[in-house]
Amino acid sequence: MGTAIIKMKIMPNSPDANLNAIEEKAKEIIKSSSNSEIKTEKEPIAFGLNAIILTFTWNEDKSVDEINNKLKEIPEVSSAEVIDFRRAFG
């Protein structure tokens, strides 16, 4: 197979959640399974709530579900989901 570019959205459980701590833990989880550089951004949702968007490369031979489940276990995380999955060319 090849390489995919994954974009995941992590939703904290409240506007008061520590986004920096969630982001750092998410990066650790992803880097433990992939040597990818990780791009992060914050997306305003509503009423002071911000989501964390992570973009990284992933080997298509491996399931993304394993990472997704680990991200959901981070304290103060309400949900984690893949919002974009594209095959990388080049």
Image (spheres, rainbow, N blue to C red):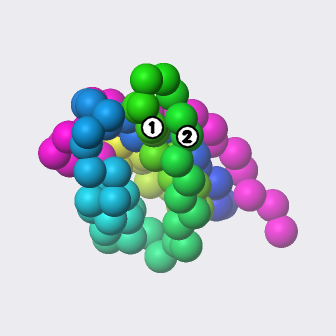
Q: Residues within 10 Å of mark 1 (few under 14, many from 20)?
A: many
Q: Secondary structure at mark 1?
A: strand
Q: Residue at x 43, y 23 (%)?
A: 47
In this rendering, is residue 69 above or below 22?
A: above
Please check the rendered image and state whether residue 27 is part of the magenta-colored stretch, yes or no. Answer: no
Q: How far apart are the alpha carbons under marks 2 and 1?
A: 5 Å
Q: Nearer the viewer, residue 25 or 41?
A: 41
Q: Secondary structure at mark 2?
A: strand
- The numbered mark, 2 or 1, whose residue comes first in the sequence reads 2
Q: Residues within 10 Å of mark 2 (few under 14, many from 20)?
A: some
Q: Are marks 2 and 1 in contact (CB under 8 Å)?
A: yes
> Is residue 90 in view from this perspective?
yes
Q: Which residues are magenta?
A: 71-90
Q: Residue at x 20, y 47 (%)?
A: 74
Residue identifier under label 1: 50
Residue identifier under label 2: 43
Residue 11, percent across and down?
Answer: 37, 34
| Horizontal side of residue 27 vs 88, given as left or right | left
**Residue 79's image quarter?**
top left
Q: Nearer the viewer, residue 14 or 55?
A: 14
| Horizontal side of residue 89 vs 72, given as left or right | right
> Is residue 8 in view from this perspective?
no
